[in-house]
Image (cartoon, rainbow, N blue to C red):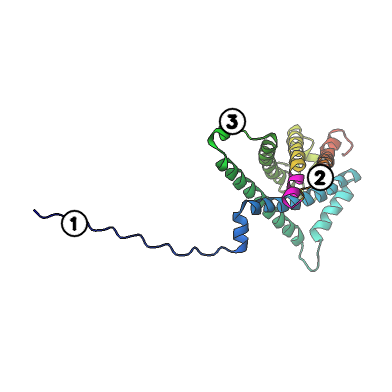
């Protein structure tokens, strides 16, 4: 009786060398790279918030001051730049910072969850107070940005708004109770986000000495309070009749 011979299974071909990743892609793929992107993009947004807050305070000096500043922004850079080009460049940079910040935060959060042991993940499912504040605060801020654009930029949810008249748009918008509630909740979320994010970004960028960290935490708290108070003063001014 003939015996069947088993044909040996050929070995799989050896995998070739992996293609080299560029330095930017390598940086983006690393945890420290994503944290650095979050820190830098966060600082860009913080700089924008400071400028935006001081600009908003012009509402207390009357429509001529506020509307004049808005006109200056639209013509900034002329004749080198065309009308409103500076505004669109600034919007593009800010949008890029927001997207990079949000994507980095999401991916870092997923990595953190995946790296936890199963038991630890079950016990600490909600994460720390700071983590929850940053996560849900970021969601609130993102939703508010959409509302803010529809309210004061496009006028979609502010039917009494007028193009090119930010003073009148602000007063009209903050005369509704729901706009005030949305704005106040969002600004409180911004303040908490700044407080935690500012010193966290500084640590990511290399500030690790205990004394410096304590100083930065105090500075972050003070900065968050100033920015929050500055933004909240506008709807409060409209509600109390100081701005009319």
Q: Viewed as shown, does residue 179 lie left or right of 64?
A: left
Residue under numbered circle 3: 123
Please tell me whether the stretch drawn in magenta is mainly helix, strand or loop. Answer: helix
Q: Is residue 202 magenta?
A: yes
Query: What residue is rendered at 23% in x and 58% in y?
Result: 7
Q: Secondary structure at mark 2?
A: helix
Instruction: Inspect this view and state whether residue 165 appears.
Output: no
The quarter of the image holding the C terminus is top right
Q: Is residue 137 inside the magenta stretch?
A: no
At x 84%, y 35%, the residue is 236
- Seen at 69% across and 57% down, the residue is 92
Q: Is residue 164 above or below residue 20?
A: above
Circles 2, 3 touching at the beta carbon (< 8 Å): no
**Is 70 or 91 nearer to us in this picture?**
91
Quarter residue 192 falls in: top right
Question: Which residue is situated farthest in the right direction here?
Answer: 61
Secondary structure found at label 1: loop
Instruction: Kindly report which numbered mark, 1 or 3, lies closer to the viewer in this rendering.
Output: 1
- Report the disc number at residue 54: none
Q: Which residues are magenta?
A: 197-206
Instruction: Give the residue at mark 2.
Output: 216
The numbered mark, 2 or 1, whose residue comes first in the sequence reads: 1
Q: Position of residue 176 (x, y in %)?
A: 76, 34
Crowding near the residue tagged with mark 1, few <14, some 14–19, many ≥20 C-alpha atoms within 10 Å: few
| Residue position for label 1 | 5
């Amino acid at each position: 009786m003939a015996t069947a011979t088993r044909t040996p299974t050929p070995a799989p071909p050896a995998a070739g060398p992996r293609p080299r990743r560029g330095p930017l892609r390598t940086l983006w793929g690393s945890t420290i790279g994503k944290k650095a992107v979050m820190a830098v993009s966060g600082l860009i947004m913080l700089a924008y918030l400071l400028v935006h807050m001081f600009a908003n305070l012009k509402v207390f000096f009357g429509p001529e001051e506020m509307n004049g500043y808005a006109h200056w922004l639209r013509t900034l850079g002329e004749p080198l730049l065309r009308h409103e080009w500076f505004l669109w460049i600034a919007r593009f940079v800010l949008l890029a910072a927001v997207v990079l910040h949000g994507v980095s935060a999401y991916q870092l959060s997923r990595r953190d969850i995946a790296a936890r042991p199963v038991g630890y993940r079950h016990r600490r499912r909600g994460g720390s107070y700071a983590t929850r504040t940053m996560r849900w605060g970021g969601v609130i801020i993102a939703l508010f940005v959409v509302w803010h654009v529809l309210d004061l930029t496009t006028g979609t949810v502010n039917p009494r708004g007028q193009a090119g008249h930010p003073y009148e748009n602000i007063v009209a918008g903050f005369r509704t109770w729901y706009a005030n509630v949305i704005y106040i909740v969002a600004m409180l979320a911004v303040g908490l986000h700044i407080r935690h994010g500012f010193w966290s970004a500084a640590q990511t960028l290399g500030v690790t000495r205990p004394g410096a960290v304590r100083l930065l935490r105090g500075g972050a708290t003070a900065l968050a309070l100033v920015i929050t108070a500055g933004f909240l003063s506008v709807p409060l001014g409209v509600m109390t009749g100081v701005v009319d």
